[in-house]
Image (tube, rainbow, N blue to C red):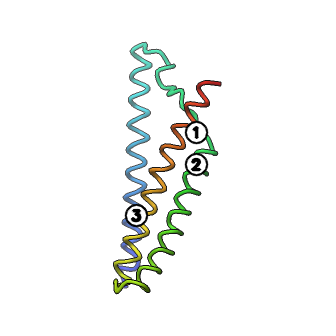
Amino acid sequence: MADNILVPLIVFATIFGIVYVFLTTRNKERLSLIEKGADASLFNSNRKFFWKNFTLSSGMLLVGIGIGIMIGALLSKSIPLEESIAYPMSIFTFAGLSLIIYYFVARKMDKTDKEQ
């Protein structure tokens, strides 16, 4: 009974701790650089977050997972392969392939954005 409560509590506390340490360390580092006279433009990475990149990557990932589930079902029915092997194998394979394809698509989109 206590495991049902402690495990999620420990997971969320760990995630909170990691985020808290990251943000406070980054803030202290930035403050010390500013105190030493560093230029504030150092913190700007000139890279903006574009929702189109996020939606494209998540969409391609979800399509890859969907194709992986479909191929896993076909493999488990047509080839004498256990479902516990066929599904994860095909899901991870096609999800990875979709992210690799996204990398090349995003790189091409970045090149066309820089040219304009």
Hey, what amino acid is under mark 2? Answer: Phe
Q: How many marks?
A: 3
Hey, what amino acid is under mark 3? Answer: Thr
Q: Residues within 10 Å of mark 3 (few under 14, many from 20)?
A: some
Residue in the image at 56% along x and 56% along y: 58
Q: Which residue is mark 2?
A: 54
Q: Give the image location of residue 37, x and y in percent.
A: 43, 13
Above/below status of 59 relative to 52: below
Residue in the image at 46% along x and 21% along y: 42
Q: Give the image location of residue 54, x and y in percent.
A: 58, 48
Q: Which residue is mark 1?
A: 49
Badge 1 vs badge 3, beta-carbon distance below 8 Å? no
Q: Which residue is mark 3?
A: 93
Question: Residues under labels 3 and 2: Cα distance?
Answer: 21 Å
Question: Residues under labels 1 and 3: Cα distance?
Answer: 27 Å
Q: Quadrant of the N terminus?
A: bottom left
In this orientation, which residue lies closer to the viewer: 33 or 111? 111
Q: Quadrant of residue 53?
A: top right
Please tell me which of labels 3 and 2 falls first in the chain.
2
